[in-house]
Amino acid sequence: MTLLTLESVSRTYGEVKALDGVDLTVAAGELVAVMGPSGSGKSTLLNLAGGLDRPSSGTVAVAGEDLARVRDLAALRRRSVGYVFQELNLIHSLTAVENVMLPRELDGVAARQARQEALAVLDEVGLREQAEAFPDELSGGQRQRVAIARALVGERRLVLADEPTGALDTATGDEILTLLRARADAGAAVLLVTHEPRYAAWADRVIFLRDGRIVDASLLESAR
Amino acid sequence: MRAVLRLAWRDIRRAKGRSALIMAMIGLPVLVVSALLTGYATVLVSPREGVETSMGRADAIVRPSSVHGPVEQHPLSAMAFHLGLGNQPPEPWRPEEVAALLPPGHRALPYQVGTAEVRLPGGFETLDAVEVDLRDPLTDGMRTLVEGRLPAAAGEVAVTEAVLDLGVRLGDTVPVTRHARPATVVGVVEHPQRPTADEIVSLPGLLLLRPQKGEDLGFLVDTPAPVTWPEVQRLNRSGLGVLSRAVIMDPPDETSRSGYAPGYALGSALAVFMVVLEVVLLAGPAFTVGLRRRRDELATIAAQGASKRHLRMIVLADGLLLGGLGAIAGGLLGVVLALVGTPFVARLGTPLGPPEVPWAQVLAVVALGLVSGVCAAIAPAVQVGRESRSARRKAGKPVLGVVLIGLGLAATVLILQGDAIFGFGSWEWRALTDVLVVAASVVVVLGVIALMPWLVVRSGRAARRLPMVLRLPVRDASRHRVRTASAAAAVMAVTAAALAFAIGYQSNHRGNLANYRAGAPLGMMMVNGQHGVTTWERVRAEAEARLPGVGLVPGMVALDAEDRVITFSMPRTCSAGCKSYGWHGEELPMGDAALLRLFQGRDDPAAAAALSEGKAVIFDSGVIIDNGTITLNGYYRYDAIPDPVRVTLPAVRATAADPAQGGAVLPAAAVAAASGLKVAEARLYGMHVPADELRLERDLMAAGSADLFVEHGYPDPMAGQLWILFGSSLVVVLGGTLIATRLAAADWRQEQATMAAIGAGAGTHRGMLAGQAGFIALLGSVAGMFVGGVAGAALAISLTAKRSGSFELPETTTFVVPWGFTVAMVLGLPLLAALIAGVFTRRPRPALTRRAT
């Protein structure tokens, strides 16, 4: 089942063409890595995929729904899309479990149920014990795991990760990739932006962007 | 130090918005106070500035006292007081007696001041009257001739322009004094320092009545040598009051000592302290947020070898520069505004002296502004380098706060029990208790300020059970506890002050209300002929014409042999805690059954029968009827009469129209028979509140001479003041809360991006800002409610004790909580703050994970 589809998607900022006619699909159970040099359009691709930005032309669809026709993109993000960033990931005034509850509560789910769901996902990412800790009491790796738990809570199956290992040491970075891989294997679609080949190697498919265009889309085997 | 100041200066210029905000917060109070000080100094005509207008070129004004014998006076006033002579009858001075006491070679020019009544087209007007020959060179500078000429003969007057506005023209002849002496207006003069004065000037002997009898004589005196303070004291021993030019120019040391009030000084010091405290609390969060913004910069400076002390200096320099610039700008603007504005204010009727800037005071206020800036920067400066992750969510044990609160409360109890415990039983101590209670409450306020960070952190922990849209702002506020505690403390202090004032004075008002006895039913009006029967027919006709359909009931007055109105009052039977009457309540009405019906609001056949039998009908339950009779005292309202009038009448009790109404109705014929006085109709009563009382009174005044009185009940001067108080609190609460919320929003920008990515919409953003503002304001107002409640109760006790005139603590205290005001302060203002913060916010852009590159 295809969870994310981009067809001929372009995005221009004034004179600058950040993305230029990109076609891409990500299916459930698939981890796709996006690589490319600085300024190649990786983050723009992720913003468009999550509905944080709208394309200048082309179509973006999440779980078969054309985003151009979605009026409440915030609701779509709450229900269908999970984000993981490099940093500034968590709300510092909320505990780990409250951070994970947040999208569900924003969606109107009762606090008690949201907490149960959040604790369950925290359990899955191995942070049940740290549920009541505040972000600045957690390590960098633990913080990213909370962010991944938040990206997965509820029925969301599309995870967009923007350099989630950028601020972590290698061992912790590996832990995070292991977790993302496991979520993909459990049925989630993961679109991972990274510039490190060693993390791209965890992906089922790697696409290379240069000047806003996909210059190579290969299967895992070819990437290796 | 130069490097530190340069860094601070650059940062101030870089963050213009924040800098302007802090400067405004510090500069505005400085502006207001400097403008008030300068305006007051300009409007106030000091004795030195007023010496020309008060004595022209003379060396002194000499005013004999009414009694021969030693007197005492203030160096800057010719008013003299007798020493231990009691109530001696006046002994008029002869001018030659005064002359004999003055130094040889002097010249004395008669000079009297007082008030005179002038019959103008609109009725009698009371004007300031001056009797002096303004043509004499000794009077140079006292008045300026604007038009016409100066009075040169008896029967000639000059008036000021304000009198022309009342309808007088140059060349008119107007009747002056109650003797209607004709006076021709020959000139228009101006008082150099009171442009709006209503003044009339003549040669001696026309306007003022008493100097004719040798009382209130006065002279401008030119002496060969200046009249020194020892010379003034020598003249005092003979009974002369002297205002001397030499003494005004070089006052003796005791001048400044007189009139010193410790309560006033302490009260002023507390007010200044609270203003500085508010400024520090309001400006504090802005410095804290600025500090967070500069953390990277400070880290870079630390990496270059700056010590913690250097970093603290940089943050303090911020406060020094912003405080200094704000205060100087505020001070200068205030002075300019005052100098430009006072001539306009003087047109409203205040005096106008020469432009004067009280530089020492203005500089002190500017210095206070600067100190406020530095104080506001102290907390962030201490924070520099202290920040650690583990320390952030912890607030130390609230020892200091608890100790201060305990001390303040203990002091309050001690002050209220002071008389009982220490035997301070003196009026001086009693007079100070209010202000001491306020001082003790300020200590409690300081304790709660010290406690506030702890309260903020505890609230953050308790937020777990709140819905998300409230939990998030409460947690965020709790995380940034310095910013939050500072703003909440500002709200707390102002709420506490407002509530303490409202409770204290509302309780006092209720007490006064309970002590008030109305002399007539609420809403009754009385037209009173001032001169008995002489002009009454005209007044009555005018009243009936102006008040058609009101149902006016006539009342009688008693007149003595000289046709003076003698009014009667009941003897007081209480010593302390007396219920007091308003307006004419003590002047008992006299009339028939119709008048009694009006005062009782119904038919009471028994009371009406008693009245017709010549019995006084008494409503005041506090008046003792002795053996079925009552003795009344008669007096003339405008002067003492040599033979006191006492009348004993049979009396009965009856119930008045209103429960709070006292007084009585007297039978006219019986009073006449018992006192030997004549009775005649000279009053009208009716149940009616005229729409424009002043206008009606003027109309009646023009017809003859009449007063108009309306029983409005005990006046509530606080009602308006409470709203002014509420308005001022509103400004501080909204200002403090919204500033803190805007700073929070600026801090939040990064987290907003995350929130938007997770799926938070604009409503969540608004909700969070509203929640943040509501939390800060509510925390402050609830804490303020407790402090204000305690302080208000203490004030109420202190004021009740003062009212009862007893040195003991009262057994029951009138304690009134103005609930509407309290709810508006404690719940209304936080809700309003939340609403404004939520509504007036920019919709956040859906933030991008990183800007496209």
Image (spheres, coloured by chain):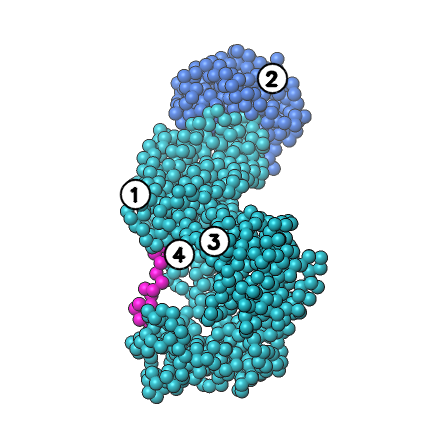
Chain colours: A blue, B cyan
Q: Does label 3 or label 1 sit earlier along the sequence?
A: 1
Rate crowding at label 3 as few (under 14), some (14 to 19) or many (20 or more) other CA atoms within 10 Å. Answer: few
Front in this rendered view, residue B279 or A77: B279
Q: Are marks 4 and 1 on the same chain?
A: yes
Disc 4 vs disc 1: which is toward the camera?
Answer: 4
| Cβ atoms at labels 3 and 1 below 8 Å apart | no
| Cβ atoms at labels 4 and 1 below 8 Å apart | no
On the image, the x and y values in percent for residue B482 come to 40, 38
Disc 3 vs disc 4: which is toward the camera?
Answer: 3
Residue designated by label 4? B366
Residue designated by label 2? A3
Report which quarter residue B335 is drawn in.
bottom left
Rate crowding at label 4 as few (under 14), some (14 to 19) or many (20 or more) other CA atoms within 10 Å. Answer: many
Q: Are marks 2 and 3 on the same chain?
A: no
Disc 3 vs disc 1: which is toward the camera?
Answer: 3
The chain to which mark 4 is attached is B
Residue B545 higher or lower than B245, as above or below: above
Q: Does label 4 or label 1 sit earlier along the sequence?
A: 1
Residue designated by label 1? B309
User: What secondary structure is found at the residue carrying circle 3?
Assistant: loop
The chain to which mark 2 is attached is A
Specify whether residue B333 is painted magenta: no
On the image, the x and y values in percent for residue B545 come to 70, 64
Residue B57 higher or lower than A18, as above or below: below
Residue designated by label 3? B626
Q: CA distance from mark 4 to mark 2?
A: 67 Å
Q: Are marks 3 and 4 on the same chain?
A: yes
The chain to which mark 1 is attached is B
Q: CA distance from mark 4 to mark 1?
A: 27 Å
Which three-letter amino acid code belongs to the residue tagged 1? Arg
